[in-house]
Amino acid sequence: MSWYFDPNRVTQAAAFLVKCSGSNRMPYLKLLKLLYFADRESLLEKGYPITGDDAFAMDYGPVLTRVYDYIKCQIRAGADVWSKYFCTSGYDIELVGDPGTGELSRYDRRILEAVHDRYKDRDGFDVSHLSHDFPEWKEVYKEGTSTPIPIETILKALDIKIENLQAQIEEDRCYFQHFGEIVRELDRKGGGVLST
């Protein structure tokens, strides 16, 4: 079982968080944690994460694996989208362009902003330490490794029922694919983006 992952959407979510800081830079450890926290919150409230990325348990807590690979400049599907708007500088991520927010709903933006505001005065290591309290991380973490955190483990930790979830995931995947293509086509034609 896996969520729908769209590099455009995750790039917009990351850029939105960086812009919330009032700067064009953020320590990438903090960005990774804030994205994971936003995914958890979105799962709790609406049953679907914002990024759709796979999580791994690492020494500094849960990490979204594709985003981490993008930050580390690894060759991976979607890395070309990310690299148009971000560059990695030491332990910081720098926003070098604006990907917009057309693939993020108002709801997504509200969650991202709330998560940012909740942790804005904490550094990446503080936020990382907080993520060590998550049951899904504790259940699979092995020191010095990168261990996948199954979606089922995350859902169990959040006390979300798994029945009929596969049908919901497939429905959401179709929705995001369809509307993502419409938004990108509008952007290419210069017609602006949809705001939901």
Image (tube, rainbow, N blue to C red):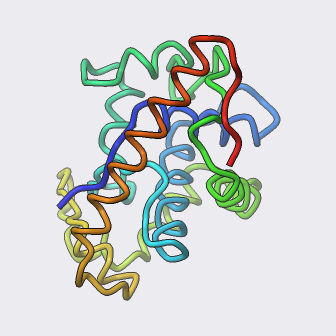
Point 66% across, 28% down: residue: 100
Q: Going 36% across and 84% down the picture, which residue do you hit?
A: 160
Residue 76: % across, % down: 25, 23
Query: Does 140 sit above or below residue 99?
Result: below
Outermost residue to the right: 22
Q: Quadrant of residue 68?
A: top left
Residue sitting nearer the eye, 129 or 153: 153
Q: How many marks?
A: 0
Looking at the image, residue 10 lies above or below residue 60 = above
Residue 171 placement: quadrant: bottom left
Q: Is residue 44 left or right of residue 52?
A: right
Residue 36 at x, y percent in the picture: 46, 56
- Relative horizontal placement of residue 103, taking residue 170 as reference (left or right): right
Residue 11 image offset from top left, x and y in percent = 51, 32
Q: Is residue 179 left or right of residue 187?
A: left
Foreground residue among 123 and 117:
117
